Amino acid sequence: MSHTTLQKKKLVARISRLKGQMEAVERALEAERPCGEILQLLASIRGALTGLTGEVLDDHLREHVLNAADDAARAEAVEEISEVLRTYIR
């Protein structure tokens, strides 16, 4: 069973909180709140998304690299991480 399946409830809860944070930005914009307030909301979203990404990445490393069935599976997992990191740092 995949680590994301095992952690599904926790990950979905984090996504729900992110949705709520995005809706707070929308409400702040609609209410013409000060830009500093909106920037703080956006910074919170970025932190939450970074935390979620880190959690899934950590689980991926442990499940598919550290506990890989064989060297081929390990190499595939490393390549997946490498592709994600290239995209992430652009």
Image (cartoon, rainbow, N blue to C red):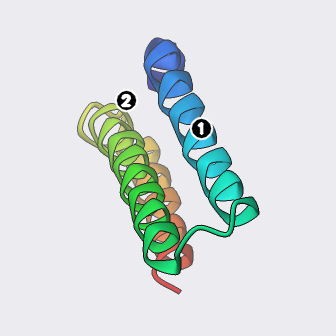
Residue in front for this viewpoint, 24 or 87:
24
| Disc assigned to residue 63 | none
Q: Callout 1: helix, strand or loop?
A: helix
Vertical side of 17 occupied by 22: above or below: below
N-terminal of the two: label 1 or label 2?
1
In percent of the image, x 46 and y 53: which residue is there?
49
User: Could you tell me residue 53's position as x and y percent?
Assistant: 43, 50
User: Could you tell me residue 8's position as x and y percent?
Assistant: 52, 18
Q: Residue furthest right?
A: 30
Disc 1 vs disc 2: which is toward the camera?
1
The reply, left or right, for residue 5 in relation to residue 85 is right
| Disc assigned to residue 20 | 1
Q: Residue furthest bottom?
A: 90
Vertical side of 19 occupied by 76: above or below: below
In percent of the image, x 52 and y 65: which residue is there?
84
Q: Which residue is mark 2?
A: 69
Q: Which amino acid type corresponds to the residue marked 1 in the rendered image?
A: Gly
Vertical side of 63 occupied by 72: above or below: below
Residue in front for this viewpoint, 19 or 66:
19
Between the C-alphas of marks 1 and 2, the distance is 39 Å
Q: Which amino acid type corresponds to the residue marked 2 in the rendered image?
A: Ala
